[in-house]
Image (cartoon, helix red, strand yellow):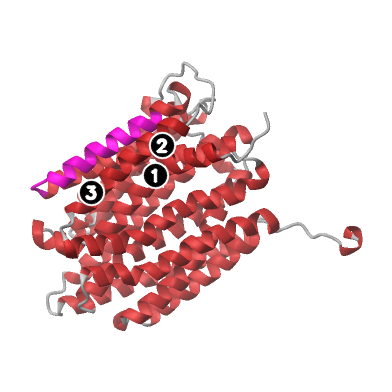
Amino acid sequence: MVKKVTPKLVTAILSAGMLSFLGILDETATTVTFPTLIKEFAVTTDQVQWVNTLVLLVIATIVPLSSQISLRFTTKKIFIAGIVFFMIGLIIDIFTPRFDLLLLGRAFQGIGTGIGLPLMYNIILAKVPKDKLGFMMGIGTMITAVAVALGPVFGGIVTDLLTWRWIFIISTFLAIISAFTGSYAITQLNKLQKVKFKYGQWLAIAVGLVLLMLGFTSIAKNSFWSFQVIGCLVFGLVSLAIWLKLSWRDRHALISPHLFLNLHFSMQLICYCFAKITTLALGFIFPIYVQTVNHGSVSLAGWIMLPGAICDALMAALAGKLLDKKGAWLPIMGGIIASLAGVVMMTVAGLHLSDLEIILLYALYYGGYGMCFSSLMTSGLTSLSVADHAQGNAIFNTLQQFSGALGTALAGTLIAISQNNHQLLRQQTTALGARWTFMVLTGLIILNLVIAIIFVPRPPKTSTHLEE
């Protein structure tokens, strides 16, 4: 059967993408409310970052099951399950009187998003013709990019005019609409099979990721050599080693470790992860910076984030077109260079960033990110065989979420460490922690540039004589 991009297919992609959209909308919307949540629930900076870190971590542990879930259950049932979990989380968050219950609700939202996120990309990979794949992958990325663009403004305006709880109330209505459109448009992607869930492999991955995150975030309040830090990191690595042992000889592994032996895949995956770490770290820093250092309002913090997120959405769509016509090299290299320029200038001016400088530098960074991010995923997946696309997609989405959680935790931890210096004003320690983070992120993007130069496929050189 010839693949075509029909209105029903677009509706299916958008409906599945709505779970990703709402997950990221709520994530970016709540980020600008962190100072409000800190006051209302009497928590610290490193504690409040778990409002988003937990969601991303839950998604990272759910996504590895996506390939097996898609073989065991119908596509439509998977979508409905994602909607139900997400809405349970929304209801808890709307009515919660305590911070721990807020985190519980966010965990349920993470389960729903973790189910829905791979579904959108699986629909694209299964149903979209190859000559439109780059464009539609860009559209899929743009769905989340629009959420990033709207989230801070949406969260700021809603919090200023109503309360932060209305963020989740409005998301509930959008989730209901998505449930109806998805039930109509989403069709079966593959034949169902009786597969046994790889519970041991999944548990080893989940425990490993959770322990690594707990160890990393504990650095803000404990010595690196304490059990809370080094113990969690060591046992996390041991758990991942157990996963490797369980998976290595399993031809039907939950996630095949053999895919990482493909250097073009694994190196572009690393670039993808570094880009996500940087983006989520900056998304955490700037709303707090605007409110704490520059004394702006919640809504102002949201508006300042908007131009950068718009650049991201526009560049993601442009990158898809470029990839289809010119290959992955141009959008990836151009994007990394633009992102690097933005973060370097943030580092130089880190202690004294005005609101206008944040707008301009964030737009420069985010435009570059939009150019390279979806292109790295598309290029990485096309380096695999078609049979490995589902697992490759699961790997990208798992590590995307874990990297996002790591980025948020990185920024939250460094700012919290800086804020432990009570000899300086809070606005000074916040700015100092932000600058430390910018320096780390600069190093990551430099590594990205080096890796991309070596491993991103260059477009084939065509002879003018032959073309004539």
Q: Residue at x 18, y 45 (%)?
A: 93
Q: Is residue 54 magenta?
A: no
Q: What amino acid type is highlighted by mark number 2?
A: Thr
Q: Residue at x 44, y 65 (%)?
A: 310
Which is in the foreground here, disc 2 or disc 1? 2
For marks 3 and 1, the one nearer the N-term is 1
Please provide percent x and percent y for residue 291.
21, 73
**Which label sits on residue 168?**
3
Q: Is label 2 in a helix, a strand or a loop?
A: helix
For marks 2 and 1, the one nearer the N-term is 1
Quadrant where the image shows the N terminus = top right
Q: Are marks 2 and 1 in contact (CB under 8 Å)?
A: yes
Where are the magenta residues, as a range? 78-98
Taking the image as shown, residue 319 lies to the left or right of residue 47, namely right
The foreground one among 290 and 387 is 290
**Distance in Å between CA atoms under marks 2 and 1:** 10 Å
Please provide percent x and percent y for residue 149.
38, 61
**Distance in Å between CA atoms under marks 2 and 3:** 20 Å
Please provide percent x and percent y for residue 299.
24, 68
The foreground one among 165 and 73 is 165
Q: Is label 1 in a helix, a strand or a loop?
A: helix
Residue at mark 1? 18
Q: What amino acid type is highlighted by mark number 3?
A: Phe
The foreground one among 250 and 369 is 369
**Distance in Å between CA atoms under marks 3 and 1:** 14 Å
**Which label sits on residue 396?**
none
Q: What amino acid type is highlighted by mark number 1?
A: Met
Which is in the foreground here, disc 2 or disc 3? 2
**Which label sits on residue 181?**
2
